Amino acid sequence: MAHPQMFDDDDPLLERVRAIALGLPGADEKISHGRPAFFTKKIFAHYGGTEKLASGEMVQHPQALLVLLDPMDAEVVLERPDSFVPMYLGPSGWVGLGLDDLDDEELRELTIDSYRNTASTRLIKALDAQE
């Protein structure tokens, strides 16, 4: 059974994420579990996610960026009040961050850091040549 669409295609925050993610070498977008995911061969960013609280309650974060960061960077991000550990992906090092207070430079930096953690050497070289 297909997952229902869990995003608004005209969401301006999604447009910000798309503009950055799809500007990276070899990047594309697909729908994964009802939400946009950005990938080369591996996913490097998700738009929106779910957090499972200690009480078992599920909290939806429809306007959040999920990224795979190095452990030290993830610790810093998780100190922010608008951050969370996403269900299923959190144990693999993914973190979620609300987009409301995230400026374009922070958004770009987090997206690129995650891209570098998942992309091939060839694509990282292409990114370095772009910057």
Image (spheres, rainbow, N blue to C red):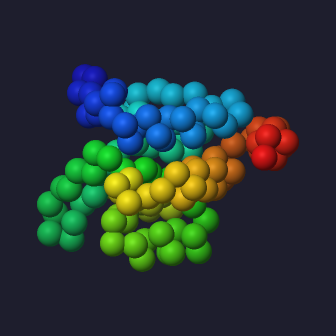
- Above-or-below relation of 118 to 5: below
Within the image, what quadrant is residue 130 found in? Answer: top right
Q: The N terminus is located in which quarter?
A: top left
Tell which of 130 and 52 is nearer to you.
130
Question: Seen in the image, is 64 located left or right of residue 58?
Answer: right
The residue depicted at 61 percent of the width and 65 percent of the height is: 70
Q: Position of residue 5 (x, y in %)?
A: 27, 28
Q: Position of residue 7 (x, y in %)?
A: 29, 33
The residue depicted at 69 percent of the width and 51 percent of the height is: 116
Question: Seen in the image, is 9 located left or right of residue 65?
Answer: left
The residue depicted at 47 percent of the width and 40 percent of the height is: 16
Question: Seen in the image, is 53 located left or right of residue 17?
Answer: left
- Above-or-below relation of 101 to 13: below
Q: Position of residue 112 (x, y in %)?
A: 63, 50
Q: Position of residue 21 (x, y in %)?
A: 57, 38
- Above-or-below relation of 93 to 39: below
Within the image, what quadrant is residue 119 found in? Answer: top right
Q: Is residue 114 visible?
A: no
